[in-house]
């Protein structure tokens, strides 16, 4: 059983309106993986990154992605999740996590997402909720 709440930061490094917002996810001040979100579309559901600020994320079970974490209290939004995927079309307004950046079908992408998502969930074993800080560095 985990007796601490992990410190999780999503650091956005680059925003590209064609390919998405690329960043990195840190857990307890250590880089864990890369991320892909949609670009900023003024927090519109399913097509926008979420506003950079602090959130609580809670473990949930979803029909599409199984057990994952949902970013709670995003204004006007629900079901903002961490889940696997490779390109902007897979984001659905959520945060994709993967091992590294690359290209897929001539599009900028994040790769080895499925395995990285499994490692993320293993890292969060025993964690029911965590505090997420989103920082923009571009």
Image: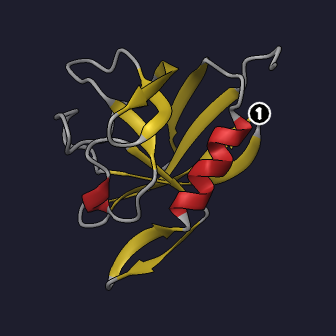
- How was the colour assigned to the protein in this rendering? secondary structure
Residue ID at (30%, 57%) = 90
Query: Which is nearer the eye, 72 or 122?
Result: 122
Residue 25 lies, in percent from the top left, at: 61, 45
Callout 1: few (<14), some (14-19), or many (20+) C-alpha neighbours within 10 Å?
few
Q: In which quarter of the image is residue 81?
A: top left
Q: Mark 1 points at which residue?
A: 28
Looking at the rendered structure, the number of numbered marks drawn on it comes to: 1
Q: Is mark 1 on a helix, strand or loop?
A: loop
Q: Quadrant of residue 11?
A: top right
Q: Quadrant of residue 21?
A: bottom left
Residue 132 in the image: above or below residue 129: below
Image quarter (top left, top right, bottom left or bottom right) of the N terminus? top right
Residue 91 lies, in percent from the top left, at: 32, 51
Residue 78 lies, in percent from the top left, at: 26, 23
Residue ID at (33%, 35%) = 63
Q: Is residue 9 left or right of residue 52?
A: right
Q: Is residue 50 left or right of residue 115?
A: left
Residue ID at (44%, 38%) = 66
Q: Is residue 94 left or right of residue 101?
A: left
Residue 74 in the image: above or below residue 134: above
Residue 121 lies, in percent from the top left, at: 63, 40
Residue ID at (64%, 44%) = 120
């Amino acid at each position: 059983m985990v007796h601490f709440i992990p410190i999780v930061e999503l650091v956005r490094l680059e925003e590209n309106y064609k390919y998405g917002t690329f960043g990195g996810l840190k857990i307890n001040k250590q880089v864990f993986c890369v991320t892909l979100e949609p670009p900023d579309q003024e927090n519109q559901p399913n097509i926008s990154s979420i506003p950079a600020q602090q959130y609580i994320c809670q473990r949930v079970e979803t029909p599409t992605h199984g057990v994952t974490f949902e970013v709670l209290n995003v204004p006007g939004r629900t079901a903002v999740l961490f889940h696997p995927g490779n390109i902007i079309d897979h984001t659905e307004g959520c945060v994709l996590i993967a091992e590294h950046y690359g290209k897929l079908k001539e599009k900028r992408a994040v790769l080895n997402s499925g395995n990285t998502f499994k490692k993320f969930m293993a890292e969060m074993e025993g964690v029911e909720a965590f505090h997420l800080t989103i920082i923009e560095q571009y």
